[in-house]
Image (tube, rainbow, N blue to C red):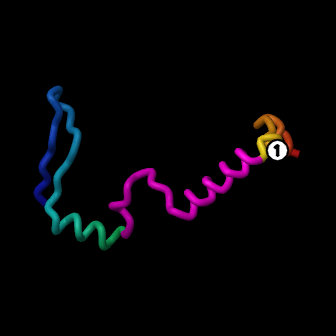
Amino acid sequence: MSLQYISDNSGHTTAVIIPIEEWNGIRSKYPGIDAIEGELPQWQKDMIDARLKEIAEHPERMQPIEELFAELDS
């Protein structure tokens, strides 16, 4: 594999380029590796949206985090 390194003006390596054949081999071995890091699956986004909507509609149901931890500890 012939790697190419990209550096910033200070000489710090900021990226690596690999041949597309190697990348395709890695992608086939590790499906999903090219997903955006930190990207949430749609079902998780939907769940967060539903919870945020519930909080907006019923803020009185919110409780301090300390109370939640105490409840979970008991």
> Who's the residue at 28% across and 66% down the image?
26
> Who's the residue at 33% across and 61% down the image?
34
Q: Is residue 35 left or right of residue 3?
A: right
Q: Is residue 54 left or right of residue 33?
A: right
Q: Quadrant of the N terminus?
A: bottom left
Question: Within the magenta stretch, is there residue 43?
Answer: yes
Give the magenta part as a residue range: 31-57
> Who's the residue at 86% across and 44% down the image?
71
> Who's the residue at 19% across and 65% down the image?
22
| Pick the front one: 72 or 55 | 55
Image position of 5 with respect to 49: above or below: above
Toward the front, the furthest residue is 57
Amino acid type of the residue that numbered disc 1 sits on in the rendered structure: Arg
Question: Within the magenta stretch, is there residue 54?
Answer: yes
Q: Quadrant of the C terminus?
A: top right
Q: Residues within 10 Å of mark 1 (few under 14, many from 20)?
A: few
Toward the right, the furthest residue is 74
| Pick the front one: 34 or 4 | 34
Q: Quadrant of residue 31?
A: bottom left
Whether residue 53 is visible to the viewer of this picture, yes or no, is yes
Toward the top, the furthest residue is 10
Q: Secondary structure at mark 1?
A: helix
- Read off the residue under disc 1: 61
| Pick the front one: 42 or 34 | 42
Toward the bottom, the furthest residue is 28
Q: Quadrant of residue 8?
A: top left
Q: Quadrant of residue 60?
A: top right
